[in-house]
Image (cartoon, grey):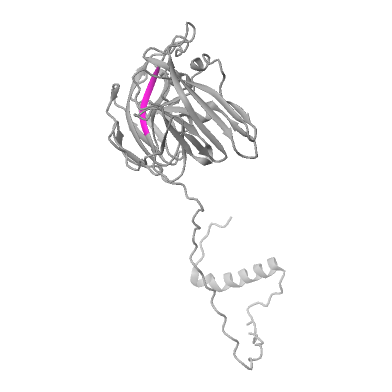
Amino acid sequence: MINQRFSLKSSAPALFIAILIILSLACGLPTRGMEEIPATTPTLPPAPTSAPAPTEAPTYSPTTTAEPTNPPAPALQGNYKIGDVIPLGDYVLVVLGWDTVPGSEYNQPEAGNRFVAVEALVANNSAETLAVSTLLQMNLKDDTGQNYDASYMATMGLGGGGLDGQMVPGEVLRGYAGFEIPENAQGFEFAFDASYWGLEKIFIDLGAEPSKVDAPAGLGGEIDQQIYKIGDVITMGTTTLTVSGIEYSQGQEYSEPSEGYEFLVVDLTLENKGSEPVTISSLMQMAVKDADHYKYTVDLFASMLLGQGSPDGDIAAGEKLRGQVGFQVPEDAAGLMFVFDAGEDGHFFVALQ
């Protein structure tokens, strides 16, 4: 180990020569001592006879992101409350209120739960037939963020007036969405999704306590529907419909309407004027609505009273089929209309009162 420092003036020449020798031996190169290495003249390529064409600088275009074909619609913003008239593209929505509702003798919530119902008005503000679905478009949230889907059993306990089905342009539907929730749940928001996919979801604050407001006089966009009367022969594509009459009933010992309700039986005839069979379903195609836009679907207990049978099934070309369909409606219901959903041929309304 060298621990003696060299004087730069006295030792620089000897040190420089020693370093050159060591480097030459380490690299396997011949040593030339301190003799000067002759410089070499580089060989240059011959000069070109003509100047080369200048190379064009590459051009760059800014990177762009293509717009998606169907960009998702942003969630609608706003703090809504009961009674607000809310335009939602193809729909118009008004939440009228909510309350806890009792079940029926054969339809009770699970222990520790209760049924609640949210009442709303929905209007079709488009030029096409629309569907509204409590299961796919509506839910309830409490103040913990817990989500509750619509409950069929809770809606059944309301005695009719659900918020499901098809609506023709300008048609209004009023009814209830039922939910089963824990008894201690509180702080509710009602959610409605106009897109079915969470892209157009809004929230309505329902308040701390049950409440209800009157329905507005109009929602905007309503269209007066053509109303037929009992006895009219109505053409629906290749099928005709005739409502012959109605009757009311309080039922029998084991088939009675709910308190404040009565059974309504509609007598009707369908005739296939086409060359192909048609299929009829009273459950999927028939309903009754009142002047307040509440909708009542086919009732199982009312149908049990019918001795002649319902007009369901396939109707052959040229065949005529008569039957009765039962509903359960409030005793004080006014402006009742029978509604037949003929699919692409539209909805047909027959005044029953």
Could you tell me residue 176's position as x and y percent? 39, 25
Determine whether 165 is above or below 253 in the image: below
Q: Nearer the viewer, residue 201 or 120?
A: 120
Would you say residue 145 is visible in this rendering?
no
The residue that appears at 61% across and 69% down in the rendered structure is: 19
Q: Is residue 113 left or right of residue 60?
A: left
The residue range painted magenta reads 115-121
Q: Nearer the viewer, residue 106 or 315?
A: 315
Q: Nearer the viewer, residue 301 or 308?
A: 308
Could you tell me residue 54's position as x and y percent? 56, 84
Task: Looking at this view, name the residue that lies furthest to the bottom.
Answer: 49
Question: Main structural element of the magenta stretch: helix, strand or loop?
Answer: strand
The residue that appears at 50% across and 15% down in the rendered structure is: 301
User: Residue 328's quadrant in the figure?
Assistant: top left
Residue 116 inside the magenta-drawn segment = yes
The residue that appears at 56% across and 74% down in the rendered structure is: 13
Q: Is residue 197 left or right of residue 88?
A: right
Could you tell me residue 219's position as x and y percent? 32, 39
User: Residue 124's quadrant in the figure?
Assistant: top left
Residue 247 inside the magenta-drawn segment = no
